[in-house]
Amino acid sequence: MSAKHSDHPRLLLTGATGSIGHYVLAELLQRGCDCVLLLRPSIEKSWQRLGKLLADLGFDVPALIDSGRLSGIEADLADLADSDWPAPIGPIDAVVHTAASTQFQPTAGGDPERTNVRGTQHLLRWMTTHNVNRMHLVSSAYVCGKIEVPVAETGLDAPVFHNAYEQSKWTSEQYCTDWASHHDRTLTIVRPSVVVGDTPTGRSTKFSGFYLCARATELLSRACADSPQSQRQSIKLRLRGYPNDRQNIVPVDYVAAMTAAIVSDETWHGRIYHLTHPDPPSNGQIKEAFEIFFDIGGGRFVRPDAFDESDLNDFERLFWDVSRPIEHYYIDTPDFQRDNTAEVEVATGIHCPAYNETSLLRLIRYAVDSGWGRRRPQRLAGNTSEYTAYFTDFLPAHIARSQVAQMSGLTVSIRFIIENNGDNHWVCCFDKGRLIGVHHGPNTVREDIAYRCGDDVFWEAVAGEVHPQEAFLDGRAEIVGDVELAMKMAMILHAFNREFPCDRRRLRTEAVKG
Amino acid sequence: MMCREAITCEQITISGHSGRLSASLSYGDDQPRAVGVLLNPHPHMGGHIDNPLIRTLATHLVDAPAATLRFDYSGIGASAGARVDVGESMMAFWDTGTAPEDQRFEADAQAVARWARRELAIPVVLIGYSFGAFLAHRITDEQIVGRIFICPTLTQHAFTSAVPLSCPTTVIFSDNDFATPMNTTRQWIAASQTTTRSLCIPGANHFMRGHEPAVADECLLSIRTWLNIGATS
């Protein structure tokens, strides 16, 4: 594409520590944008949180701050009057507004209206005062509310909403649209549907929406933990809905890539985009994935008009209570038009990947491994081994600073099988040179290539003392999968190991310290 | 430095494209009847002086009897020249299987072959493995008495020469080579006017791991055939 802001646009980004926001930030940084972040107090804790989030995606936040590509302003957008903004911020080319509350119903603190409406109003006032004339708003596809006709990528008259969240996002769009009606201002809106974990690993930092039904299924599975298999597979469970209705889930990396592509190119500005799935998975597909993962069965769909709330067994009540707030995501789901989005997809090559059993299971696996967001899945509870220290601390910390991170063509998943009192499996996922995921265990992520070697060879290799290619050629290591790809990757791994050799003894010491 | 009993290894330097190339000349007690110039695979694919197959050839061919001359390309190991393990080179190789330094590696190979012919005054056989086979093909010295291509990269590089090769050629390949499908190699052999011997090693792959002695045996046979040397007891 030709038209751009500039070679290095400077953007003000809200919501950078959010579940979508930090992925959008990563994509903008990857595209060469410099970003000023609005961070909630305390800014130190926000930087710490952001540092961990971006490290998971292969970015070194301290290095980005040192280089001037990343800076921050401490502020709570919802409480910010124009006079409270710290100055100077410096020139800003555009605002990317991802900050949002996803509370469905009003809270004691005033959300979602407080963040989504008042916060947006404050932001627009600041933009007016400081002549920042481009706004990129991350809204929601569900501003359409209850609708039976296809939803166009246009402004929408006030619909009937399912909840306060939808209403607040719609109201936010109206304020932005009014602001943009003035001369020389441009408003671009992206409306994602139900955002779930990323494509390669299923990683997410938020487990609402789609995940609520998965969580309900897990609870059912636990309730049946002591039941014989025959009973587990024939649970009496009526589910309100249709098996062929679709749940419009989209991976967060797709949403972020599209948002960043749209922000980065003026050609796409001034329009509305439905970042929705062109071929969403059906309720039946999703139900089957849940049943496979949690090893239960017997649930069946019941037409909504035949579902009697007063006549539910304990399992059905449990499931109904959890899934009811998001029922509109999987019953009579809207048909989202996406012509504008398709145009960007064709031009950029970004596409929304299809969901199948494997990818649905990946989402659930990540959610379960992370304790539904309570822990980082690669750090197993109580496991302070040197392997954990290498793969989850040393490698992510250094790879972002290495030559590997410059290799934008490097997209591959690698499994390391280390023979040490049984097999120790680690899978590292690279996307465009960035380490975006590290997983432990034999049945986690599907890899492109695998290396198998002994404990001694592994530590010699990561210390830079032996070339992985040599280890293979000498028979000290084995390759599984594409040998050519593996040998090329070995070349790159050795370069990293020479650039950042790992001292096993230091890892042991630090692992013990915890 | 002794490589193994009854084999002498001399460490020598040869002027290459970017400075002095580190090389090792190996020979046995018997007067060598030829010298095999060993051309390594690409440095990004394990191409260095201690590559297992290259090492095996250096020790086995003394039985021909032949000397062997192996070396590191410029920028590799102890050879002078800009290091090649930098991001740009690796990324180009990741994408295409070629690197910006390939032309200087070819110049290195030419220099080593020239040195062998000039300094050793015995017939020169070029033995190129993988990328090294392509370099062996590119050396158009009329005084080369034979060439051996091991797992030639026929789909990666253009094995056509402006000057037709006049010396006999042996091709050693496998039935599972990611670099060149077996049928492609067979077709090339059939069309080649100089290929007099060929050997397909079943169950091997591009790296010939575990099959190094079989490769060395065929090289030894080829050299003896070309130089009309009877087998020694």
Image (tube, coloured by chain):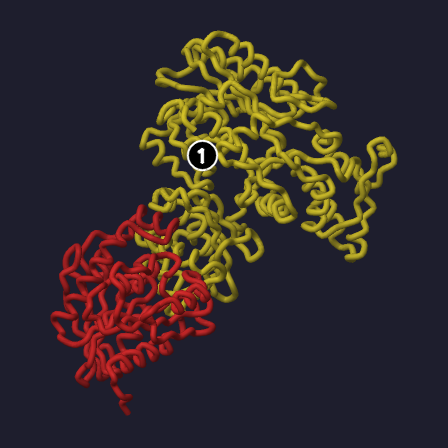
Chain colours: A yellow, B red
Q: Position of residue A45 (x, y in %)?
A: 45, 31
Q: Is residue A136 above or below residue B78?
A: above
Badge 1: residue crowd in 10 Å (few <14, some 14–19, many ≥20):
many
Q: Is residue A453 visible?
A: no
- Which quarter of the rendering shows the N terminus of chain A? top left
The residue shown at (29%, 67%) is: B128
Q: In the rendered view, does B145 fall on the left or right side of A413?
A: left
Query: In the depicted view, which residue is nearer to us: A258 or A253?
Result: A258
Read off the residue under disc 1: A26
Q: In the rendered view, does A445 fall on the left or right side of A511?
A: right
Q: Position of residue B54 (x, y in %)?
A: 30, 70
Q: Is residue A157 visible?
A: yes
Q: Position of residue A217 (x, y in %)?
A: 72, 44
Total number of numbered discs in the rendering: 1
The residue shown at (48%, 61%) is: A417
Q: Say which chain tag 1 marks.
A: A
Can you tell which quarter of the image residue B225 is in? Answer: bottom left
Can you tell which quarter of the image residue A48 is in? Answer: top left
The residue shown at (19%, 81%) is: B32
Question: Please, what secondary structure does the residue beneath circle 1 have?
Answer: helix
Q: In the rendered view, does A452 fall on the left or right side of B1?
A: right
- Residue type pointed to by label 1: Ala
Q: Position of residue B121 (x, y in %)?
A: 13, 75
Question: Residue furthest toward the left?
Answer: B119
Query: In the depicted view, which residue is nearer to us: A460 or A346?
Result: A346
The residue shown at (79%, 45%) is: A299
Query: In the depicted view, which residue is nearer to us: A156 or A439?
Result: A156
Can you tell which quarter of the image residue A343 is in? Answer: top right
